[in-house]
Amino acid sequence: MNKYLLSLVVLCIVSNLRTNNPAFSQACCTGGAPLSSNLGIKSYTENALIIDLSYDYNKLDQLYAGSNRLDDSNRERITRSALLRISYPLSKKWTITSILPYVWQEQTVFSSVGNTKQSANGIGDIVLLGQYTLHNSKKHQVLLAAGPKFPTGTVYKRDSEFGLLLPPDLQPGTGSWDGIGALSYSHFGLFRPTLSLHSLLSYRYSFEVGRYNGGQEYRFGNETIVNLGLSDSFVIGNKILNAGLQYKLRHTQQDENNGSNFPNTGGTWMYLVPNLDLQVSPKVKLHANFEMPIHTDVTGTQLVTSYRANIGLNYTINLK
Amino acid sequence: MKTIISKLGILLVLFMLSCSSSSDDISDSPPNNDTPPSDPSSYSINLITDSFEGENFVVIGSEGWNFMVAFHSELEGESLSFTVIDGELPVIMEDDMGSRYNIFGTAIDGINEGKQLTPMNAYMGYWFSWGAFFPGLDIFDSNLPVQNQGESVNGSQDWLIPREEVYVGALRDAIPAIDSPQYTNPKDDSFINSIGEKALVIGVCIDNQYKSYPHAILNWHEIVNDEINESYYSVVFCPLTGTATVWNRFIDGEVTTFGVSGFLYNSNVVPYDRKTSSNWSQMLQMCVQGELSSSKTDNLFVLETSIETWSRISTSNRMLSTDTGFNRSYNINPYGSYPTSLTVNFPLNFSDDRLHPKERVLGVIVNEKAKAYRFESFK
C-alpha cells in the first residue's frame, strides 16, 4: 500500500516537472490569497457544518536569483489574508467546501531617497471544492477533491496618489479562473496508535486572463504542492494537543504573457512546517502553523517568503 | 483499494500531463539585437543623405559595427555634402571642404577642424516603440504601406498623455537608479569580458572625456545619474523599448537626479525627477505630469554601439562597473528572451507590424514627427 502511494506521488511530481519549460517556472508574487495551501481537505462526520476562520501572514523580503540569496533589503511585501472556510458533508462520501478570502496586500520599497509604500485590500478569489472519500478505514484514509477558483477578487485597485491601476501582484484577486485538484492520503496508527502520516498532493491549473482592457493576455503558471508530514496526539489536562511537522514542496511553472513566458516567475520552494492543533472542546479546535523556507530555487530574480504563519479557529455545528 | 489507487494514479498523471501546457519558444530573432552579424562585409560603413520635415541631414551607420548616428548637414549656416570614410573608426565621413569628422560629429582636421556638427534629435529603439509613439512614421527606403497615419492621443486627468494608458510596472525606486557610479577598465574586468565584445553599451562623450554604460547593467537600473566636468546628466535606458537617451539634469537652475517611477507608457520607462517628483516620458522627451509638466528634456548626444566598436572610439577606459551598490545578477538579462521575442509586455496606443517589433532602428525626430532608419539600409 505504502509502496503504491509513494510511486503515485513520485510519478505525479515527475510528470509535472517533465512538462515544464526547462528554462523557467512561476513565482509566488501573484495577487490573491494563498488558497492552495489552505484547502483543508479532511474527512468530516455527517450532519455537521464546519466553520474555520484563519488568519494568514506571509512576509516576503528576501531577494533570490536562482537558488542564491542576494544581499539586498530594497523591498518588502506582506500579504495578510483572512480565510473563512465552510465545509458541509453531504453524505458519508461527499463533502462540499467553500473558501472565502479577504486579502490585504502591502508592498514597500526602501530607498535612500525615500520609501514608497502601496497597499490594497478586498475580497479575494473564492474556491469551491467537491470532496469525495475514496477510502476510509481505521488505518487508511484517501480523499479526492476538485473544484474551481472563481475570479471574484477585484483586480482594479488603484493607487491613491495618481489613480493608476496597481500592478497585478498588489491586487486582492488574480482575475483568472483556476481549476484545483487535490489527493490526500492519511495513515493512522503508524508505529503507535496516535502517530499519523499525512500527505497531500494538490494541483492548480490557471486559465488565461485578459488585463488592461484586453491589451495583455496573462496566464499564471500552474502550481503543484506536495505536503508530507507526521503528527501525534497528546492529552494535556483534559485537552487533546495534536503536534506535527510537515515537509512542503511547492513548484510553479512560469507565467505567460501574450503567449510568451514571463521572466522572473516560477520556481521551486521547499519548507518545513511545524503545526499545532488544540482541541479545546468537542466543537472547538484552535490551530496554528509556521512555514520556514529550507530551499528556494526561483527563475530569474524574485522576492521570496522569509516566513509565513497561520492561526485559526475551527468550530463544528451539529445539525442533527 | 489497490485497484482504485492504481486507476486514480493513472488518471491523475494523464490529467497533469494534459494540463501542463507551456508556450512554444519563439525562435525568430530580429536583426542586430546584441548579436550583429560578424561577416566582414557587414562591417562596411555607409552614409545616407536625407531630408525630413524641411531638415537636411546625414545618417551614417554600419550593421557590423552596430551604430547609427545622424547630423545636420549645415555647419555654421553653410550647407555641406558628405562622403563616407570606411575603415578608419572613429573617423566616419568627410565634407566637401576636405574636413574629416569623427563619430561624434567633430571635425578633426581641415578647414573646419574643431567645429562641431549639430546632432539630430535621434536615438535607437525597438521598432514597436517608434510605431506606438509616432503613429504613421516613415521608414527610410521602404515601400510598405504606412500604418496608423493621422492617429494621435490626448492627455487626461492632469497628464499630457492618456492616464489610463499609464501602467504601474513596479513601485517607485523598486528599480534602483545608480547615483554613485563606479568605473572599470573593460580590458581588465571579468564581467565585461564575460558579456563579450558584441554586447551593447551606451556611450557618452563630453569635453573629450568618454564614459560608457553596458546594457547588461542598465537592464537592472535603467538610470545612471552622472557627471563629467560639472556637466550633470542622466543616462536613461528602457529595457522594454530598447531606448537610450542622455538628459541634462540641470533643470530650472538646479541640479537634480532622476529615478525610476515604475510607471510605463507604451511599455516605455517614465523617469521622475527628484526635485519636483514630476513624471517624464523618455521617448516623448518631456515632462508629462507634475510641476514641470510640458517641460522638454535637454538631450545630449548618445552613441549606442557594441563594446567592440566603443573600444575603437574611446580613448579612455571608463566603463560602468558592476560595483553599483546593489547586489544583482548582472550576467543575466532580467527580461529573459524579451529582446528577441515577438512579445510586448504592456499595451500600446498603436501597433505597427511593418517590421519585427524588436528590430532596433534609429528614430530621427523633427517637429514631433519621426522617421526610422534600419541597419539594412547601410549594407
Image: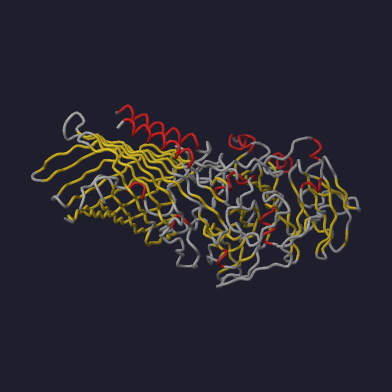
Name the residue nearer the viewer: B1 or B309.
B1
Residue at (64%, 48%) from the top-left corner? B342
| Residue B349 vertical position relative to residue B213 in the rendered view, above or below | below
The C terminus of chain A appears in which quarter of the rendering? bottom left
Quadrant position of residue A183: top left
Name the quadrant containing residue A174.
bottom left
Visible residue check, residue B206: no
Quarter in which the N terminus of chain A is drawn = top left
Q: Residue furthest top?
A: A3
For the rendered model, the colour scheme is secondary structure
The answer to whether residue B332 is seen in the rendering is yes
- Specify whether A151 is left or right of A238: right
Q: Residue at x 56, y 56 (%)?
A: A216
Q: Please state the total of marks drawn on the protein image.
A: 0
Q: Position of residue B33 (x, y in %)?
A: 68, 44
Q: Is residue A93 left or right of residue B45?
A: left
How far across and how far down the image is residue A132, in percent?
31, 44
Q: Position of residue A261 (x, y in %)?
A: 55, 45
